[in-house]
Image: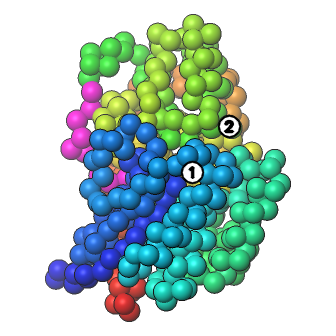
Amino acid sequence: MPLPLYKTKVAFSVTNCICHDQRVMKMAGVLSNLGCDIIIIGRRSGYCCKNDSVPFRTKRFGMIFRSGFLFYMSFNIRLLIFLFFHKYDFLVSNDLDTLLPNFLVSKLKRIPLVYDSHEYFTGVPEIQNRPFVKWVWKSIEKLVFPRLKYVMTVSDSIAIQYEKDYGLKPLTVRNCSVITELIVPFSRDELKIDPYHLLLIMQGTGINVDRGGEELIDAIAITDNVSLLVIGSGDKFQSLIDKTIKTGLSDRIRFISKLPWQELMRYTRSSDVGLSLDKNSNVNYNFSLPNKLFDYMSAGIPVISSDLPEISKILAEYKCGIVISEVTKDEISNAIKKLRDNHGLLSELKQNSVIASESINWETESLKVVELYRSILDQI
């Protein structure tokens, strides 16, 4: 029986680049499939925005300030004005840095608001040593969060923490990947990578402090017959390039700037092993369940991961990876060698990853989102 279609206008808000935010794209896709008219509001951030392949209407603010307090203040003011003077039936705020204007407009216009928290925002490492900045974001969260009705987040650990903080437990919607078996991988000839090397990949648009990038490069330096792709962006991206050049590893480590997801998955499906090396240095990383984990599983490759509870739980359940006890060059190197030298184990873990992706995928996970959104749409 087909789902009823809703002629409803929905506005999504996000501060990062619309082109590369797969969670927003997937969430918007769910509502679009329900017949809703979607607009995604964000920033004009780079070359990708000029060649827009986003399948929804967008509004991108050109920002004078690119980061910091003045960026967030000016973005939130512009978002508040835009939402107030345009008519939408309900709003979706993505992360704490868009929540306040969405909340104010939802109250003024008496329309529903869904808050989708992609991380435990006040626990990110970038603000832990900036007490005033952390106080501002925490104050906004304390003001708004207890007054919300519809909240989603990306892991059970974050949901439980929010329940402890505010007495409201969000719906956990993991950022699973869509099924990717039809995406054609690159050949080793196309990649110009030694066909006898174990090919590793570390992806992410937030390759920042404490993500294990430095230790990974040191591990490659002491591990023969392996090559590495690092694809994405982040605060540490350029310094990792510089470190690779300095250590003479440019023939085995290749850096590629962030890509559209379909293109990224061609590289991921070409690889043998995916890496997720976030350190347990802050609450946000400890609770994380990153996109890349699901991308690796969808690509049918095993994962080498740091010992974080949400990731370790999945790898243990599906037996599709190796968990290292600490993020050091020796621990990373030993795990890589274990897969490089044991083709039977590598093959087994790859098959387990394929099996895992058959049950952990967006097609299944999104059913929870459909149920939530339909409950809201039925009341409008």
Residue 166, percent from left and from top? 71, 78
Residue 60, percent from left and from top? 41, 54
Neighbours of disc 1 within 10 Å: few (<14), some (14-19), many (20+): many
Separation of residues labelled 2 and 1 (CA atoms): 19 Å
Which residue is tagged 1? 311
Residue 81, percent from left and from top? 51, 70
Which residue is tagged 2? 209
Q: Quadrant of residue 313?
A: bottom right
Q: Main secondary structure of the magenta part?
A: loop
Neighbours of disc 2 within 10 Å: few (<14), some (14-19), many (20+): some
- Span shown in magenta: 176-186
Depth order, front residue of 262/20: 20
The residue sitting at 46% across, 54% down in the picture is: 61
Q: Secondary structure at mark 2?
A: loop
Residue 344 seen by the camera = no
User: Is there CB contact under 8 Å for labels 2 and 1?
Assistant: no
